[in-house]
Image (tube, rainbow, N blue to C red):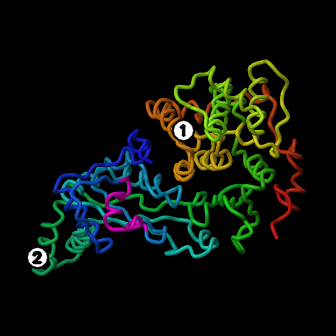
């Protein structure tokens, strides 16, 4: 992983904690949350305050995320909103923390000027011993305060002020006034500088979780389903009608179709579909060439064609399917028949413009592991696991490619690959799921569901 770290592709854009004051605030918050402290005086933290260095020091990389649920956090600065989230267990966690910090930027700026803010992302469960427990997670509530209890003191002071205003003889209540003075010394002037946090409850209905080998739970859709990266039969009984795994390609394709979640790359307006397809094909060539022991240093377009010719017998069906689609898109061939049973099918898709587009692109990355760029952008946890087992030549090539083609302009790369503009409906043939060239009648959907018979 050293190459990735050196190029900022892993543990990049973290918040540097190096001043004695910040280290002291972090330790007070850490002790408040976990009863532990670190002896380090220089480390980096992510958006939640988790530090890989502190994890090594404590011998526990889940020190702020025990059990993988109800993630705790430590905020030293609102600038942490620019940081990534490491050791992700739920796909929604980063977005929730980012929204919370953004919505309370002024309050957090005032609080972190003198102290840390420590808190927890609280849901209705404390453990997920079985997949069925995930369905109890619907709302996430943020609980936060400084280790010294500034927010609690402010709430207490506000209640005393209301009591002082409402009670007829409050002017003569020396005990009440003394309490107000004491709390005001801890909180400051809450009338001029209110420190109440807002928007602390967030919905979590459609999400990915790392638990149980990786699960994609879609509850808030017209046709809900759960999609497992591993064998669905090992999940047990679940309170949802449709459960698929990555082997259920036709049903997943129908799931996308019936919920309008994905679109063809060559159909999308405003993107260079041919260039995207060509790059996906190059990644497939690199995978084959690396396994065959070829030198991947300084490859250009001519070298890619040469490698493809030399390894033609070893190229998988994903390559031939994408090649046929590329020939069509550049005017050099007939429209290819690529159904959901074809290994290239999901490589031809990207998420449609819906509220769940990031989650769909993440699922597509899992279904298309040879597209290393999408895998890195959309599913870093899976990318890092796969990277560890690659040949050294492929590791070097991929790290150099991502540094050169993605790291220099992340926003531009994301926009080119996943940005959304109105599509060219009717101008390009659909790539349809196998055996489902048209949507099934609604009566049939009601009887057996949009993806076939229910799992027994």
Q: Which residue is mark 1?
A: 393
Q: Position of residue 439 (x, y in %)?
A: 85, 46
Report the magenta residues as a range: 46-65
Q: Residue 177 versus residue 341: which sits nearer the camera?
A: 341
The secondary structure making up most of the magenta span is loop
Q: Residue 172 versus residue 267: which sits nearer the camera?
A: 267
Residue drawn at x 48%, y 68% is 69
Residue drawn at x 21%, y 61% is 25
Q: Quadrant of the C terminus?
A: bottom right
Please say whether residue 60 is one of the residues in the magenta stretch.
yes
Q: Which mark is residue 178?
A: 2
10 Å neighbourhood of mark 1: few (<14), some, or many (≥20)? some
Q: Position of residue 277 (x, y in %)?
A: 68, 30
Give the structural element (helix, strand or loop) at label 1: helix
In the rendered structure, the answer to whether residue 399 lies left or right of residue 235 reads: left
Task: Give the quarter of the image for residue 345.
Answer: top right
Tell me if residue 135 comes above or below residue 402 in the rendering: below
Q: Position of residue 414 (x, y in %)?
A: 53, 35
């Amino acid at each position: 992983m050293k190459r990735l770290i050196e190029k900022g592709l892993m543990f990049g854009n973290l918040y540097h904690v190096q001043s004695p004051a910040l280290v002291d605030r972090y330790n007070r918050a850490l002790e408040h949350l976990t009863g532990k402290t670190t002896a380090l005086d220089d480390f980096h933290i992510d958006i939640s305050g988790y530090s890989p260095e502190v994890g090594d020091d404590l011998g526990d990389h889940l020190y702020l995320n025990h059990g993988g649920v109800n993630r705790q956090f430590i905020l030293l600065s609102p600038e942490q909103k620019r940081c990534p989230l490491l050791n992700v267990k739920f796909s929604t966690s980063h977005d929730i923390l980012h929204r919370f910090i953004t919505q309370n930027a002024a309050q957090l700026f005032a609080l972190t000027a003198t102290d840390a803010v420590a808190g927890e992302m609280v849901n209705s469960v404390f453990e997920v011993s079985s997949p069925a427990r995930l369905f109890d997670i619907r709302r996430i509530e943020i609980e936060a305060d400084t280790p010294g209890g500034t927010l609690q003191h402010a709430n207490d002071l506000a209640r005393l002020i209301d009591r002082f205003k409402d009670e007829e003889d409050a002017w003569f209540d020396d005990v009440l006034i003394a309490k107000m003075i004491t709390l005001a010394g801890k909180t400051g002037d809450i009338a001029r500088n209110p420190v109440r946090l807002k928007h602390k409850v967030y919905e979590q209905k459609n999400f990915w979780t790392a638990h149980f080998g990786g699960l994609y739970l879609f509850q808030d859709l017209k046709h809900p389903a759960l999609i497992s990266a591993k064998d669905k039969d090992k999940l047990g009984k679940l309170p949802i009608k449709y459960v698929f795994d990555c082997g259920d390609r036709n049903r997943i394709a129908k799931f996308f179709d019936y919920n309008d979640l994905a679109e063809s790359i060559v159909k999308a307006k405003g993107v260079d579909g041919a260039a995207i397809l060509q790059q996906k094909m190059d990644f497939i060539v690199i995978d084959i060439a690396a396994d065959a022991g070829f030198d991947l240093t300084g490859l250009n377009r001519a070298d890619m064609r040469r490698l493809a010719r030399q390894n033609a017998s070893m190229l998988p069906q994903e390559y031939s399917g994408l090649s046929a689609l590329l020939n069509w898109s550049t005017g050099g061939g007939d429209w290819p028949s690529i159904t959901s049973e074809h290994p290239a099918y999901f490589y031809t898709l990207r998420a449609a413009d819906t509220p769940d587009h990031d989650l769909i692109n993440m699922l597509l990355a899992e279904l298309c592991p040879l597209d290393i760029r999408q895998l890195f952008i959309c599913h870093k946890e899976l990318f890092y696991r796969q990277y560890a087992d690659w040949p050294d030549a492929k590791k070097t090539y991929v790290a150099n490619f991502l540094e050169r083609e993605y790291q220099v302009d992340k926003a531009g790369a994301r926009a080119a690959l996943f940005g959304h503009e109105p599509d060219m409906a009717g101008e390009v043939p659909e790539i349809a799921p196998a055996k489902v060239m048209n949507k099934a009648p609604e009566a049939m959907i009601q009887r057996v569901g949009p993806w076939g018979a229910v799992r027994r």
